[in-house]
Image (cartoon, helix red, strand yellow):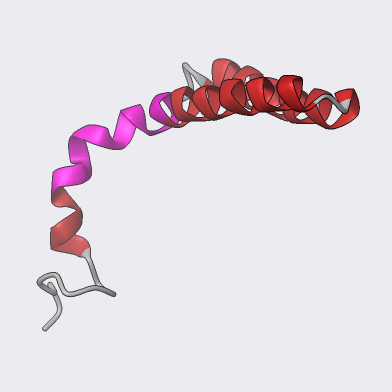
Amino acid sequence: MQKTRALRYVLFSLLFALVLVGIVVHNYIALASLMVCGIILAIVSDFIETAPTRPYKQYNHMHDRHGDGPHLNT
């Protein structure tokens, strides 16, 4: 997770910059295209951020203490 920290910070900063540019431009076509680029960038950033924990996602149902999953301390 530490290996991609700089990349994640750059991607999330770029997302913030896209939103800021979209607000400043006052052009609906540019704003719409920047929104689409921002959504794509957010999806890629989220994919990179959750990649280290993805192999362990199958074990979440065993430790779900607030949902309907099986409880370990019953």
Q: Nearer the viewer, residue 24 or 59?
A: 24
The image quadrant where one finds the C terminus is bottom left
Q: Nearer the viewer, residue 74 or 17?
A: 17
* Residue occupying the point 57% across, 25% down: 36
Q: Is residue 2 left or right of residue 72?
A: right
The image shows residue 74, relative to residue 26, as above or below, that is: below
User: Could you say which quadrant of the image residue 15 lies in?
Assistant: top right
Q: Nearer the viewer, residue 47 or 26?
A: 26
Magenta-drawn segment: 47-58
How many numbered circles does the render carry? 0
Q: Residue furthest bottom?
A: 74
Is 18 colored magenta in this rendering? no
Is 55 colored magenta in this rendering? yes
Q: Is residue 26 left or right of residue 41?
A: right
Across and down, in percent, residue 17 comes to 77, 23
Mostly what secondary structure, the magenta segment? helix
The image shows residue 47, relative to residue 30, as above or below, that is: below
* Residue occupying the point 67% across, 27% down: 32
The image shows residue 43, relative to residue 67, as above or below, that is: above
Across and down, in percent, residue 64 comes to 22, 66
Across and down, in percent, residue 51 comes to 33, 28
User: Could you say which quadrant of the image residue 66 lies in?
Assistant: bottom left
Q: Is residue 9 left or right of residue 69?
A: right
User: Could you say which quadrant of the image residue 60 lies in?
Assistant: bottom left
* Residue occupying the point 15% across, 50% down: 59
* Residue occupying the point 82% across, 23% down: 21
The image quadrant where one finds the N terminus is top left
